[in-house]
Image: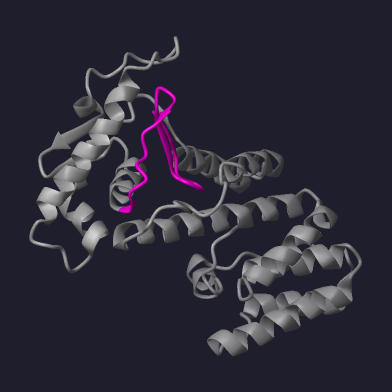
Amino acid sequence: MKIKALGMLDVRVNGVDIAPTAPKPRQVLALLALHADRVVPVSALIDELWAARPPRSARTTLQTYILRLRELITPALGKRAPAAAPPAPRSAKDVLVTEPGGYRLALGGGTSDVREFERLAGIGYRAADAGDFRQASRLLVEALALWAGPAFADVQTGAQLEMEVRRLAESRLCALDRRIEADLQLGRHRELLAELTVLTSRYRTHENLHAQFMLALHRSGRRGGALEVYQCLRAALMRDLGLEPSARLRRLQQSILTAAPEVSPEAGPRAPAAESSVRAGSGARPA
């Protein structure tokens, strides 16, 4: 099985797309695919489909959706699997398994782009923490390349999936932030200018991105541009959140006012996680 959720939903068994087009069965598959190999409780599926107002027939209707998914899986199991693939399950019930209290989609040695993204990003973070910025940048570029758009872009989302979409969007933004930081450490400030122009326009109150843009501009000999970025950030924070820039950003502004263009990365240290999340911006998802 191959699962892609970082963009449009695509779930394939032996190369055959098993994702239904009907919105609610598609929601069920999306939630099961996200948690592949783990049991998704019936209560979570009902909450995803109907939130606080499930019909009396909710469990029966959910069972109907499960049967529909198995009907799509069955013909896919009859296709010839690649020679290197693990042995095929015997039936659709071996792929979409009924468990006590819920259902489980068996990945069966397959792949999930969400898990691969999380794996690569985790290794990239550890490389950055160890000071291997070249390796960190490479791994994070590879992780981010798995994204083809917002997670579950073509799936109607209820409470459960919407929460996961937000979590994944935040994970993506964190990986992007760390990759840019690694590139700054490698002296790639000029190559980052165009990208950071777009990102700071999209995330108007995200302090780390603005700090990175300020550093990239200043190191490129554009001190005036760096200070203008600070003023734009300050205006957005005051307008949208009623906040002044953090002490960290104010220190960075002062260092740019007084330092040479070779100002070190330490002039703009990363914000603590709590502060960064408070000032993370309008909540827009990366494109």
Name which residue lies at 47% across and 70% down.
Answer: 274
The magenta region covers 1-23
Q: Quadrant of residue 111?
A: top left
Tell me, yes or no, whether the highlighted magenta stretch contains residue 17. yes
Colour mode of the rendering:
one colour
The mark tally for this picture is 0
Q: Is residue 105 visible?
A: no
Q: Is residue 196 visible?
A: yes
Q: Quadrant of the N terminus?
A: top left
Q: Which quarter of the rendered picture does the C terminus lie within?
A: bottom right
**Residue in the foreground of this view, choosing between 130 and 224:** 224
**Residue drawn 25% across and 58% down?**
49
Residue 173, x across and y down, in percent: 56, 58
Query: Compared to 21, does 254 lie above or below?
Result: below
Which image quadrant for residue 105? top left
Q: Is residue 245 left or right of residue 191?
A: left
Q: Residue 160: x percent and y percent?
A: 30, 58
In this view, 286 is above or below 107: below
Judging depth in this view, the residue of 143 and 101 nearest the camera is 101
Query: In the image, is residue 169 above or below residue 252?
Result: above
Q: Is residue 216 left or right of residue 202?
A: right
Residue at x 30% of width, y 63% of height? 159
Q: Where does the image place residue 53, in percent across and percent down from the top left?
A: 17, 68
Q: What residue occupies the far left of the structure in this picture?
A: 56
Q: Residue furthest front?
A: 22
Dividing the picture into quadrants, the one containing residue 57 is bottom left
* Identity of the residue drawn at 17% across and 44% down: 64
Asked if the magenta segment contains residue 5, the reply would be yes
Task: Tell me if 153 is positioned left or right of 70 in this view.
Answer: right
In the depicted structure, whether residue 90 falls above or below residue 251 = above
| Foreground residue among 272 and 75 | 75
